[in-house]
Image: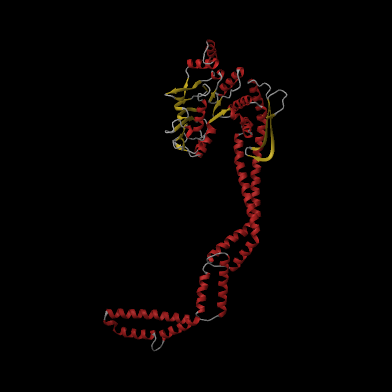
Amino acid sequence: MLTQLSINNYALINQLTIDFSSGLSIITGETGAGKSILLGALGLVLGNRADLSSLKDTSKKCVVEAKVAIATYNLKDFFEEVDLDYEELTIIRREILPSGKSRAFVNDTPVKLSVLNELREKLIDVHSQHQTMELSDNSFQFSIVDALAKNQDKIDSYKRGFVKLNQLKKELQGLETIQKEANQQYDYNLHLFNELEEAKIKVDEQEELEDKLEKLNNIEDIKLNLSEALEISANDEIGLQNLLNSLENRLSKIASFSKEYQELSARITSVKIEVDDIVSELEDANENVEFNPNEIEEINDRLQLLYNLQKKHYASNNEDLLKVFEELSEKVSQVENAEETINNKKKEIDDVAEKLDKVATLITKSRTEAIPGLKKELEFLLADLGMENARFSIKIKPTKNYFANGKDELEFLFSANKGGNFGELKKVASGGELSRIMLSVKTVLSANTQLPTIIFDEIDTGVSGEVSNKIAAIMQQMSKNMQVIAITHLPQIASKGKNHYKVYKEELKGVTTTNLKQLSTEERIKEIAEMLSGKDISDSALTHAKELLN
């Protein structure tokens, strides 16, 4: 419940702090005193848009802070979802800077206005005459029926399935779109895939072929130079091998005379071994050099194929071609396996839909069973509020369509007069009737769900006499289950409050300011007497006021 509202530099308010308690609290004041300013400040802290016109003194920032006790609201999961610190006494603060910039905080953590708006729905229900139009909103009508049907758990389960079903349908649509596009390209992609598959491309093949072709194209020079190299190395008279043999013999004869000569001899022996090895490889290379025109042609053809494929697929090398091949393989496979994939997705959709249908059937059943009780309760409450002939026609119609809250359509019709035709609420009910219907609805909801704090903003407009007493009694009854705050002009309602606050204007140094104070018992008597008879309070008005309070 709302425990405190602090307002600084907002509209006509300099500084104001209001402490609220449980039960029924009443706010009264003359027309134009600033009751709407209080609601405006509360709306601001709960996420309404703001601008510089909200600042009383445009050189200072505006701060509105609300303290809300939320221990019984089951909001821990919500706070965790939006990454906020959970506190049983939660503090919501909104600031508007002179620059026009707005900031919002929950338990000192900065938040977006979207989070505040979500939180608002869970904490405070501000009800004005304008909001009676919610009665004609189909989703609101469903919420009334579902509250009595105790459907919340079923609907939560249904919504999870509904989200899953829509996701699967979206995935199926995507698969079918991909398949359609892929089918149009299938033949061409298959041709490209087969072409690359037949090419049997290897990553390093191109470089190896280009090296081999370079060797074959220069075969004569290679043969000539290998032969001359062998002549230089192995000639019997002047070849390197022969000269090294002679050198080795000369040094071996003196090797024993000195360590220096011994090392030189060993080094020559080492060089001779290396040269012998080189000569052996030169002989092998010379023997293996063969000119094969057919091989050159084959290599040229293979390289040309690779070049053409690279150009065709905008590839820089064989590695890029292999990537293209993998992509084509996936596209071809996707088409060839698409039917099976789509059928599997359809089966998954059918399975979810089957489970969803079962939950929807339970929801329909409980709604149907709850409607007679709802109809009876509303008609009873309205009769007590002076609408003895009020009648409702509420019907549930199961459909094959999946909606966000089930598979039903709801017909919620009303007739205010005996023998009158049923029609939509917004067409057949007056403003005063809509206010009383909404009060009855909120009464039913408060007895069947955990409603947040509710604020009635002059819901009693257009009623008087005994009906106003009934409205007061209903608000008192509601306040046993929740915090109720009522802004009213009726003394009958004002007298039923546990706490009574008065909004008033005063002029200080030529500046008009709105203030609010909690009234003592004597002040309440005077306030209610003034509501009964006007500024000139009579003795009878004072007596009547005391009677109302007692």
Say which of 117 and 230 sits in front: 117
Q: Residue furthest left?
A: 257
Say which of 48 and 403 sits in front: 48
Q: Residue furthest right?
A: 419
Relative placement, left or right, of 32 versus 185 is: left
Relative placement, left or right, of 10 versus 243 is: right
Q: Residue at x 66, y 22 (%)?
A: 387
Q: Can the viewer see residue 71 in this picture?
A: no
Q: Can the viewer see residue 304 in this picture?
A: yes
**Where residue 369 appears, x then y in whole percent?**
67, 30
Colouring convention used in this rendered image of the protein: secondary structure
**Where residue 407 appears, x then y in whole percent?**
66, 38
| Residue 393, placed above or below residue 310 | above
Q: Residue at x 45, y 81 (%)?
A: 282
**Where residue 295 appears, x then y in whole percent?**
56, 77
Q: Residue furthest bottom?
A: 237
**Where residue 345 appears, x then y in whole percent?**
64, 49
